[in-house]
């Protein structure tokens, strides 16, 4: 069965959405309610700021003509106090922010004066030094914040400093959310076989709040034509934007599209994108209706691309920026549709680096977790079936703080432990390389890598750990090890790929990298390991040195990794200190 809706491109869909977005109403609000709101008026300073000449230092108010010299101390002026005129040959103690006394034309900081027996000795002074002149921060009549600016803490404080108590802001958009599906249960309810918790309405609610909207949740409706229809009509009468999830595909209980068609006007019902193909946009009464697919990730992506786009247009907020990011050697397979692939983007000092969030199945919310950008991947073609290197991306959240060294890691920064500031010189740079086909495909969760990170942190106070996952492919392992060695990693643990199966090639890859073997380490692992488990002898792991980097292969199982780390915890710090000299 074919859909009757033509498949349109996302750009065309966004243009259609744009054509239906009208500017939002304006309302008066208290300044204190203004966080993240869009200002709908220019705010002009009615007075200069500061209104009086103020000292910018704790020190003494003087006359320049008396400096250098010995002056008589004549009282004090603290912030908030007024004072009498300064006489020639006198100085007044003054604190930061206090109004300058009449007659004074400079301030000498406290650090520059000498006091002996009530006599103040001051150095030479320049006219106006350490004085904040009237209107030097803000001139009278100046536009302090112009219309359409989004208010943050600094802007609100700025307006507060001018005693602006009320502002005109763009009114919040009222959004109604509805989930459809017989299988859905409300958060907290018990689920029976085949049932799932309605996570979409919660996610959409959060996304709408993040976008500064007022949200009403209409709950869950069963896939029943009349129920869905009546709820949609009520929502359209009460809200400016309606967002539904589920029930827009080709299933026999997918009623949302036909209802919108019958009761309103559908602008599009199929998009050439992945995920989110059946996304539908319509008008119902006066409300804009976005019918998003049920799969959570489709909801997430389509919300940002279409709903958030509309919200920002209506409320005059800026669009998300499109940036160029570097995938490095990560190879991403292209789909037959243009795809919005979730990534974590970080700035490395010279360019944006992007790290995929792993398997991009549209049901896998983990691929949206921590993502701050959507790669805009082209559709595949006979000449281009996969992509790496530089790609365009929409940045939907501030970029993350992962360290630049984490060049082309395949997985999130979950266990990345470098501080925000430059690592200490003495901190050990440690790489943890998990080698597993299953983990890298996202079908298994890595427990050994995170354990090694945790234990490394315990062993080396203030160490810097880097984490990467690669499949059991000899070149990938070799390249990852080489990259880390070249970047001056002092210790690299690998976990996985040391066994007897055909895909286990970690020792072979390691041998391609190391210059000198350290057989004692692998021997110790086996000998002491045997005391706990007879299977220890089946690990083919090696250890060796390249330059100043020590690489140690550990088996993949968490038990073996735990035991292995324990066994080596005495020798490793010593080995590193020798390699450092
Ligand atoms: P649908 O678009 O209704 O065909 O649903 C597609 C998939 O998304 C199905 O696996 C649904 O169970 C799932 N799904 C639908 N609605 C929700 C929801 N509100 N929260 C989480 N998953 C959902
Ligand atoms: Mg459904």
Image (cartoon, rainbow, N blue to C red):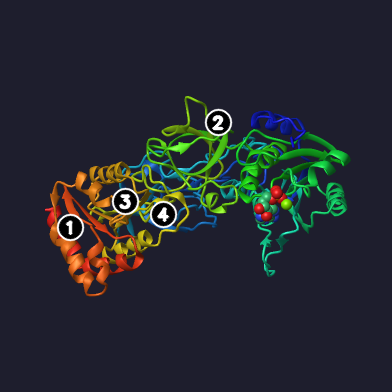
Question: Callout 4: few (<14), some (14-19), or many (20+) C-alpha neighbours within 10 Å?
Answer: some
Viewer-closest of 286 and 492: 492
| Secondary structure under the numbered disc 3 in the rendered image | loop
State which mark lies toward you, 4 or 2.
2
Q: Is residue 327 left or right of residue 463?
A: right
Question: Callout 2: few (<14), some (14-19), or many (20+) C-alpha neighbours within 10 Å?
Answer: some
Viewer-closest of 370 and 427: 370
Q: Which residue is mark 2?
A: 379
As drawn, the label of residue 58 is 4
Is residue 30 something that shows in the picture? Answer: no
Q: Which residue is mark 1?
A: 576
Give the x, y percent position of residue 292.
Answer: 70, 45
Q: Which residue is mark 3?
A: 502
Give the x, y percent position of residue 552.
Answer: 23, 56
Mark before the other along the chain sequence, 4 or 3:
4
| Secondary structure under the numbered disc 4 in the rendered image | loop
CA distance separating discs 1 and 4: 51 Å
CA distance separating discs 4 and 3: 75 Å
Question: Callout 1: few (<14), some (14-19), or many (20+) C-alpha neighbours within 10 Å?
Answer: some
State which mark lies toward you, 4 or 3.
3
Give the x, y percent position of residue 580.
Answer: 15, 53
Q: Is residue 232 left or right of residue 473?
A: right
Mark 3 and ligand 1: say if the CB distance to the nearest ligand atom is below 8 Å. Answer: no
């Amino acid at each position: 069965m074919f859909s009757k809706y033509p498949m349109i491109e996302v750009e065309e869909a966004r243009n259609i959405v744009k054509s239906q977005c009208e500017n939002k109403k304006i309302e008066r609000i208290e300044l204190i309610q203004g966080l993240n709101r869009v200002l709908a008026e220019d705010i002009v300073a009615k007075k200069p700021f500061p209104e009086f000449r103020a000292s910018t230092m704790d020190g003494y108010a003087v006359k320049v003509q008396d400096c250098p010299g010995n002056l008589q101390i004549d009282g004090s002026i603290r912030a908030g106090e007024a004072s009498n005129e300064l006489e020639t040959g006198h100085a007044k103690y003054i604190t930061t922010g206090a109004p300058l006394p009449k007659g004074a034309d400079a301030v000498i900081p406290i650090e520059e004066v000498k006091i002996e027996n009530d006599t103040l000795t001051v150095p030479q002074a320049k006219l106006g030094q350490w004085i904040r002149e009237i209107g030097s921060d803000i001139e009278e009549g100046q536009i302090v914040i112009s219309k359409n600016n989004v208010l943050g803490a600094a802007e609100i404080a700025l307006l507060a400093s001018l005693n602006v108590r009320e502002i005109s802001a763009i009114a919040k958009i009222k959004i109604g959310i509805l989930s459809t599906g017989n299988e859905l249960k409300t958060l907290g309810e018990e689920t029976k076989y085949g049932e799932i918790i309605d996570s979409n309405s919660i996610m959409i609610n959060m996304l709408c709040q993040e976008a500064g909207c007022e949200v009403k949740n209409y709950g869950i409706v069963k896939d029943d034509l009349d129920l869905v229809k009546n709820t949609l009509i009520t929502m359209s009468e009460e809200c400016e934007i309606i967002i539904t999830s589920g029930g827009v595909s080709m299933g026999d209980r997918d009623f949302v599209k036909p209802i919108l068609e019958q009761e309103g006007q559908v602008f599009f019902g199929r998009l050439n994108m992945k995920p989110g193909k059946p996304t539908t946009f319509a008008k119902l009464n006066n409300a804009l209706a976005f019918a998003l697919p049920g799969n959570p990730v489709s909801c997430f992506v389509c919300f940002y691309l279409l709903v958030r786009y509309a919200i920002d247009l209506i409320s005059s907020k800026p669009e998300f920026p499109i940036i160029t990011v570097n995938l490095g050697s990560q190879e991403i397979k292209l789909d037959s549709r243009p795809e919005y692939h979730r990534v974590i983007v970080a700035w490395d000092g010279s360019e944006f680096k992007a790290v995929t969030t792993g398997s991009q199945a549209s049901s896998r919310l983990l691929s949206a977790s921590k993502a701050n950008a959507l790669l805009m991947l082209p559709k595949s073609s006979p000449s281009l079936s996969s992509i790496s290197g530089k790609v365009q991306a929409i940045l939907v959240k501030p970029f993350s703080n992962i360290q630049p060294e984490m060049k082309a890691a395949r997985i999130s920064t979950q266990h990345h432990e470098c501080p925000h500031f430059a690592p200490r010189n003495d901190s050990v740079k440690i790489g943890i390389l998990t080698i597993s086909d299953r983990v890298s495909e996202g079908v298994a969760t890595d427990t050994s890598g995170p354990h090694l990170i945790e234990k490394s942190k315990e062993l080396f106070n203030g160490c810097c750990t880097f984490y990467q996952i690669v499949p059991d492919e000899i070149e990938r392992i070799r390249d990852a090890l080489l990259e880390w060695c070249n970047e001056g990693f002092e210790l690299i643990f690998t976990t996985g790929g040391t066994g007897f199966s055909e895909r286990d090639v970690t020792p072979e890859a390691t041998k391609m990298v190391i210059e000198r073997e350290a057989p004692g380490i692998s021997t110790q692992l086996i000998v002491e390991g045997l005391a706990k488990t007879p299977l220890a002898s089946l690990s083919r792991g090696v250890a060796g040195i390249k330059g100043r980097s020590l690489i140690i292969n550990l088996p993949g199982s968490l038990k073996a990794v735990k035991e292995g780390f324990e066994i080596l915890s005495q020798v490793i710090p010593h080995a590193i200190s020798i390699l450092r000299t």
